[in-house]
Amino acid sequence: MIGPMIGVLFDGFAYGMLLFLLSVGLSVTLGMMNFVNLAHCAFAMLGGYVTVTLMNSFNWPFFATLPFAFLAAALVSIVFERLLYRRLYGASDLDQVLLTIGLAFVAVAVAAYVYGTIQQPVTMPGYLRGSVTIFGLTFGAYRLFLVGIALVVTLLLVGMLEYTRFGATVRAAVDNQRMARGLGINVDGAFALTFALGSGLAGLGGALAIEIVGLDPSFAFTYLIYVLIVVSVGGLGSIGGSFAAATLIGISDVAGKYYVPHLGAFLIYLVMVVLLMWRPAGLFGKR
Amino acid sequence: MSVALDTPHTYLESQARWHPAEGVFWLATLLPFWLFPDYLVLASQIAITALFALSLDLILGYAGIVSLGHAAFFGLGAYAAGIVSKYGWGEPITGLILGAIVAGIVGYISSVVVARFRHLALIMITLGMGLLLHEAANSMGWLTGGADGLQGVKIWPIFNTFRFDLYGYTAYTYSLIVLFLVFLVARRLTNSPFGLSLRGIRENSVRMPAVGAPSRAHIRKIYTIAAVMAGIAGALLAQTTETVSLEALGFQRSADVLVILILGGTGRLYGGLVGAVIFMIARDQFSGSTPQFWYFWIGALLILVVMFLPNGILGGIAKLTASWRERRGRA
Amino acid sequence: MRKALLGTLLATLFAVPAGAQQTVKIGLIMPYSGQFADTATQMDNAIKLYVKEHGDTVAGKKIEFIRKDTGGIAPDVAKRLAQELVVRDKVDIIGGLILTPNALAVGDISAEAKKFTVIMNAATSIITTKSPYMARTSVTTPMLNQTLGTWAATKGGVKKVYTMVSDYGPGHDAEGAFHLGFKEAGGEVVGSVRFPVANPDFSAFVQRAKDSNAEAIYVWIPGGAQPAAIAKALFERGIDPKKTKILGQDVVADDSVLKGLGEQSVGLITVTNYDYNRKTPLNQKFLAGFREISGGRNPDIFAIGGYDGMHLIYESLKKTAGKTDGDSLIEAAKGMKWESPRGPMMIDPETRDVVEDMYILRVEMVEGKPQNVEFDKVKDVKDPVKARMKKQN
């Protein structure tokens, strides 16, 4: 009884960590600039394809591709931010939604054109496959790896936010943008950097997601829904909120499927609707 | 047309008058019968999509509610009309009314929830409700036919004389008449004090109660009305194609209608109609030649519209005619 | 000079109407865009290959294709496209049809307009009952899964099984068919579970399967991302295909699984109507031709369905000496037997559905790489659902 339950909790937590990596960037940029970027998962998809290309066409080892997945997504996002996004910072929610959805459509079409519509299989290094036994319980090796990376990223993010000047700038801009500008803080610059960071993390998440959920051009939309759920439930602009929401969603999804399989997909949407009705600004949101 | 010094009543009256361009538009909808008799089925589906977009315009363009789950009402209307015909009652007009009622009831119940939220929470809640309904329809395969779609839908001839033929004459006439009638209702609604207060809610929902307009009650009303209209559109699709599938309530349909409305321009009633014509014809053309690039072009078009034509195509035209008129006035 | 010009003019004037009469138009309805686009690419390539090998003239008439995209599952769109093909483009034959809801909708048009329609992939049994002009060259879900169930309980030596399927129409069909075949042959189903269609994470369901301690697990999932995902989830939980028999339809051991799992995929058992590794000369030729025309891809059930669909069309036209009305063509198609790259197959004269052999494959290491190897087969399988329907009547 305990064995499977711990297994389910762990798997749910690992899945939640993947969602966290995919969502944290969106949560912070939404909270900071109120910019709804639905092309966020397209950046994740980009990271995934970078890893696939480097591994399959150039035979790079998996680990070496991860920093590049991060960088590629971050750099591309800066280009789009400079060219398109900054013109719409003051525009309505709907306009931002539509611009970024348009971008996502284009990304999907380009990915389908370049890579085709098939699944991209990648073979993970041997030590990341299969399971590891600790105290008589089996844990998936890849999931352990995923949890490890997510925790390291969380620590780095929190550390950056709390202990660096840049982090202080970001916190100020999220709390009260007008005031921060009034104090002479370079909010636009901070935002551009945060946006790049968030998109880079999405790219990293996309690369890490291949092993668990696969990669094809429709990735940009399939996971968008889950990311939006995490962001809205967690609250905008909050790393802790994203972490908590992602964990909650991940565990309730997996536990729900284990204990009440007929509820299956219902549970995750039901949890979201109920939580949002109770706390419209999200668990840790400010508005 | 200076309205700055008119009273609200004369403003409404001037808006309610029929503009000659509107007459041209509606006459043009009759053209397919003579010019494109092979395309009548496509025309009927354009009319249905236009009706669906019109219903979304009422809540999005006029009341400012961003819904990502509007297809739920379309699907409910479609399934209601389809299921009742499967079990023996295939009369189209009553089936249509039944679809409208079912969608309206669910619309009213959900409007109670929708009226309480705004911004991201509202978007996500409408999305979530739409997805839940889709899942429910999938699991209730015994009622809905599940992923294979509803089988056995047989619609009787309208008034016992007009059979739904292979060429689509009946389908297009039926859809067009329903579209026009519902459009008249929508027009009346938006050019009324109620319509004005909706626009007020869209601009500043917090202040409206201070002016004496009950925002939440108004939102509930318009949301229910929009649900009824979407249900009618869905029932029309079920009846003219004699098929209903899960896609009628899916996220793709909700997203497509949003794109159509933005393309045409919100808050103008005709925006949804124009957008539907352009979108459906473009997609039909692409489906024959280069279907894989459909997403690319629609994405690029969306980006262009948002960047350069924020009020959609009709908004762009309105701006052009206004500046042209101004130049004429000055000269 | 003038005479030559006049001559050419006259020649073209006479050539055009004569040419127009001598074409056979085939409308292909497939999901060329959207999430199922890959299946359409595979089928379309196979169709192109057939025409390349056999020429584009049959019974003195030229074959012309008109392609229409449904964008995915969209029965209202499919029905409209079929109607347009018939009314606007005046096609003689309708083909393609990969997705069941679309095929069912097209059935109405096929019946009303009396057009010969070839179902090249859609796998639900009742589709062929929608129109007396429909024939199928692919396979049905019950044919595959009920056969697997019966085989597993008899020659497979499995007494207890735990089943896992996707929670939607085709998954339910597969589950029902497998259970029926397995139980009728004396096996016991110790537990079953259904997972959501759009399922990113299989771990919870795999845990349940493991809890049941069954000696075999049966899986049915749609192709795409899911086969590799569930295979990895099974492996992560320590389920070894060499010890616990993992049974499923062809996709469970497709190329993405073999590549993603490598040698951990050895032992997976699947049922299929087409194995591209088949060593017959006909298949080797087909395999080479397909790899060339598709840019290196391997053919799959979508490809072979399209290839044999074209074969049926060509042979039926030859038999009717070029007559293209629905009644003549369907009569010609009934009872047609031929040797396909997949093996022997026939169009049942009563049900107009396909009758073919089912192959049982197991993953083994061949030249250092995992590969599906055929080790058993069941001959001349007919669709069991329609056979049962007939018995009831």
Image (cartoon, coloured by chain):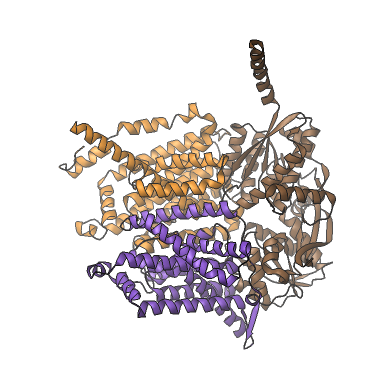
Chain colours: A purple, B orange, C brown
Q: Nearer the viewer, residue A13 or A257?
A: A13
**On screen, residue A163 above or below C360:** below
Q: Is residue A177 left or right of residue C73?
A: left
The location of residue B143, given as percent across then percent down, is: 58, 55
Q: Position of residue B329 (x, y in %)?
A: 20, 33
Q: Residue furthest bottom?
A: A135
For residue C14, side relative to residue A174 (left or right): right
Q: Residue furthest top?
A: C3
Q: Looking at the image, which is closer to me, B14 or A17?
A: A17
| Image coords of residue C196 (percent x, y) | 58, 64
Rendered position, C243 above or below C84: below
Q: Which image quarter is the N terminus of chain C in?
A: top right
Position of residue A30 measured from the top left corner of the image (x, y, whole percent):
37, 65
Q: Residue at x 72, y 48 (%)?
A: C292
The number of numbered badges drawn on the structure is: 0
The residue at 35%/31% (across/down) is B23
Residue A29 visible here: no
Task: Decide which of A13, A70 is in the foreground and name it.
Answer: A70
Residue C198 shows up from this direction: yes
Using the rendered view, name the quadrant where residue C15 is placed.
top right
Q: Residue at x 84, y 67 (%)?
A: C155
In this view, the residue farthest toward the left is B5
Q: Is residue B86 left or right of residue A170?
A: right
